[in-house]
Image: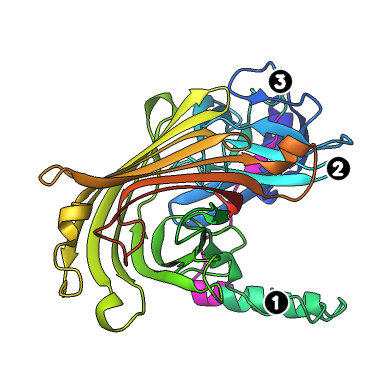
Amino acid sequence: MPDRRTQTLQRHAGRWVLSLLVLVPALSAAPGIALAAPDIEILLRGITVKEEHDTLVELRVLNPADVTKSISLPDRVEARIDNGRDKETIFLTRTADTPASISVAAHGFAAASYHLPSGVAGRDVVLSIPAWSSQTVSVIRPAPIRLASAQVAEEADMAVAIAENQPAPPPTDRTAGNLFLDNLSIYEPIYAVYGPGTNTQARIQISFKYKLFGSQNPVAESHGLHFAYTQRMFWDLAAQSSPFRNVDYQPELIYVTRPVTVDHGITLAAQAGVRHESNGREGPASRSINSLYVAPMAAIPLGGGYRLSVAPRLSLYVGDKSENPDIVRYRGHAGLLLEIGRDYGLRLSTSTRFNPGSGKGAFNADLSYPLPLLLGGGPDVYIFAQSFIGYGENLLDYDRRTTRLRLGLALVR
């Protein structure tokens, strides 16, 4: 038992240390986390104050091996806090932008972060994570919240000071000078697939979203207000001059709620948005529609690294529908998205829309698998198979029933 003088020195030392970087040997058999590679190591990078009521425990996952390793991160992990007199058990929850399973390249590292429960950040306590180590790993005493403008100015000055001592980035590096690039993220899948025997043999999609009112913070949060854009192109390669038979443009304004983790590791969130869809054509081939929608979402861990995602959607069409007045008959107001698979493995994604009154609708299924797992290396893309059956694969054919099967590659699934 430490004497009173030793305890006093420990408490005083805690007041001056913002974060302590400690190597934590990962134990594959320890409760609360399942590691696929026993030699993976975890560094506790420190504590980050995101917002007034949101503090993160930042981790770095290291792979000292000569081959790529995978690690599964639990939705919640048990931790202990100690103020020098009392100990208390708390639970850290994995952030939405930290996947449940990550792949770490040989001699590389990956980032991960967990939410610290509210009410803990302002206390002078020591944090430990028994599932990963019996050692004390960090002293929590975050700096006070600063005004956004002051923080931006300070970080800008720091960036200038660093840049003066560094060589200029290459001209091809478009990240240089783009402070808000981290607000740009993926939205819908990005792929190119091909299936012969149809008048739209190839289907190509690009998609992204950008967080509005964000910052140049290196870890962008997934919740909040976003501008999103998806473009879907249908390419008739067999026709003379290989024209694009139809192109659908989908700009959106969406709001995504902050995810909440409940019992059994289930994560809940919701998305609402206003979407405009058009094909940019004139005359009889012109199509456009506006809709408001809401989509509650749930992600359910199934064990073994598998996860089931469920997202029902309810849509309301607004504005001018003169170019496709009966589109509701073929689309309906309801839809359902289902996805099951592993973060680094096989994944099946399906989406349906239906109108019970007319009995019409559509079913789309995407099956994907990482190409490096199939070939034992190679480019970081996915083998991507896609099928569609029903009405309205694109806006031009909203009232036409089609069946399609295509195969290709995806950058984002």
Instruction: Tell me what residue is drawn at x 51 percent, y 58 percent.
Output: 201
Mark before the other along the chain sequence, 3 or 2: 3
Indicate the secondary structure of the residue bearing disc 2.
loop
Where residue 189 sits in the image (x, y, percent)?
51, 54
| Residue 301 among those drawn in magenta | no
Residue located farthest toward the left when viewing the structure as drawn: 357
Indicate the secondary structure of the residue bearing disc 3.
loop
**Residue 174: which numbered mark, if any?**
1
Could you give the CA–CA distance between mark 3 and mark 2, rounded to whole angstroms? 19 Å
Could you give the CA–CA distance between mark 2 and mark 1, rounded to whole angstroms? 27 Å
Front tag of 3 and 2: 2
Q: Residues within 10 Å of mark 3 (few under 14, many from 20)?
A: some
Residue identifier under label 3:
28
The residues colored magenta run: 136-151
Instruction: Tell me what residue is drawn at x 38 percent, y 26 percent.
Output: 263
Q: Compare residues 85 and 333 and report the one nearer the observer.
A: 333
Which quadrant of the figure has residue 85?
top right
- On screen, residue 356 versus residue 408, left or right, reads left
